Image (cartoon, rainbow, N blue to C red):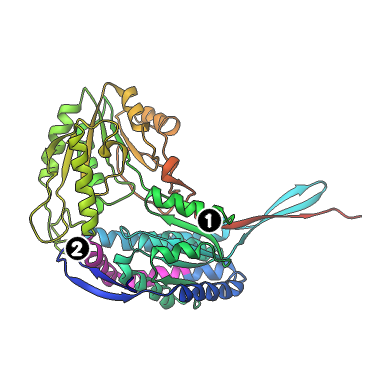
Amino acid sequence: MSNSIVTINPFTEKKLKEYTLMTHKEAKNAVVNSNRCFDEWKLIPISERAKLAKALAKVIEKNSDELVQLMVDEMGKVQSQGEQEVALCANICNYTADIAEKELANENRDYNGGKAIITYQPIGVILGIQPWNFPLYQVIRYSISNLVAGNTTVMKHASNVFGMAKKIQSLFEQAGFPKYAYQSLLIDGKTASKLISHDGIKGVTFTGSDAIGKKVAENAAKRSKKTVLELGSNDAYIVLDDADIPLAIETCIKGRIVNNGQTCVAAKRFIITEKNYDKFKDGFKKAMMQLKMGDPNAKDTDLGPMARKDLQEKLHEQVTESIAAGATVVCGCEMPDREGFFYPASILENVTPNMPAYDDELFGPVAALIKAKDNDDAMRIANDSRYGLGGGIFSKDEASATELAMKHFDTGMVNINGFASSQPNLPFGGVKSSGYGREHGGFGLKEFMNIKSVMVAQTK
């Protein structure tokens, strides 16, 4: 087995850089160093840790150009969306810093005539296993909340974004975090799996496929280690009878092709009532066919390449299987004969259960159109999924749509008449096979904490 990894530019298909993988022994030593750092880091006041988070926000902003170019070069992100990702990461750092002291403050409660203190205490080294699609955001999302909470982190990034992995560690160092508080480990999946059993690892957070995520959870559970899992989805966006169709089309296009269609909370299944189906389909097809596919560096590009050739091939295989099972092509769905790992903006209809386009996650710019009889049928179809990360509802009756979202939509997040993938002040996470645990909104600060009760008896 090779001990090196070569990163490839998905637009040019040219080699970017070669990286040497860490050995298992080197990775274990990194965990040992992280534990030693934790012993001191956990005693630093939250206010001081928050100041470093603010410093990290400034460092991220200062390095924006380089960070964006890494995203464009390593995984094909459209440049303007890379700029948005950088800005989001700075906002996450600032928001976490602003709320940390209040969220983690001790709470006093009565206790049999005495008093009790509920205190939030960090538990140690948290292993992060993160994907390539938001190569900066995915890492900042979990790491900054854990570091401000007093934990330390070691991170296994996807091998096709190892340049970003190294850059992120330098960002933490530039911001003034102590050595070993955050470490990017250039390791493969096998080594990361072995690290879960390391006594120094106290928790694991994973973002990726549900199949691999469940194995990670099983591995950690055998050792009574907590996990937070974000495992993707096939999010349903429902267009109800009274929907604003032009708004729905515009929003659904954005929700489907954001990040070249490679987003866990992207809109993927579009469920439209019979009343509006033909009108939505015609407008959606027209808008999808007008998107410009090309160089992710160019300002007028709507759709860049997929991140890797194997991902492009897997997507096309899912499309082909769906067509063989009875789905029909509205547009796209053919592998382009050109340089770069491109896949065109595509639409399938007549999508039914037991097709990849219905049951699974199509991680690329392919939309599945599903016709519903009425509003109730649309809600039924939306929930007919093993996943439950995000979703959307389009309706002019905001109150009714909100009621549906809160009480009937079986997901962790719901958009009404819009599309928003992540907000620093709102919890992020899913249910069912989309995982468990929450990040953002203050919730991530407490996921890997010992919520400890200290009971002080009344004495005479």
Query: Does residue 338 lie above or below 249 as drawn?
Result: below
Query: Does residue 307 lie above or below 279 as drawn?
Result: below
Residue pictured at 38% horizontal, 29% vertical: 399
**Quadrant holding the C terminus:** bottom right
Most common secondary structure along the magenta stretch? helix
**Left of 308 or right of it: where is 40?**
right
Residue pictured at 42% horizontal, 59% vertical: 141
Place of residue 414 in the rendered image (x, y in percent of width and height, measured from the top left): 38, 39
Q: Amino acid at mark 2?
A: Pro
Q: Amino acid at mark 1?
A: Ala
- Residue 333, quarter of the rendered image: top left
**Quadrant holding the N terminus:** bottom left
Would you say the residues marked 1 and 2 are in contact, meaning their CB atoms lie under 8 Å apart? Answer: no
Between 321 and 402, the one nearer to me in the picture: 321
The residue tagged 2 is 10
Residue farthest right in this picture: 460
Residue pictured at 30% horizontal, 51% vertical: 263
Residue neighbourhood size for the residue with mark 1, other residues' Cα within 10 Å, grouped as few (<14), some (14–19), many (≥20): many
Q: Secondary structure at mark 1?
A: helix
Residue pictured at 33% horizontal, 62% vertical: 135
Between 274 and 165, the one nearer to me in the picture: 165
Could you tell me if residue 296 is visible in this image? Answer: yes
**Residue 341 within the segment the image draws in magenta:** no
Residue neighbourhood size for the residue with mark 2, other residues' Cα within 10 Å, grouped as few (<14), some (14–19), many (≥20): many
The disc placed on residue 220 is 1
**Left of 276 or right of it: where is 42?**
right
Segment colored magenta:
53-79
**Left of 9 or right of it: where is 139?**
right
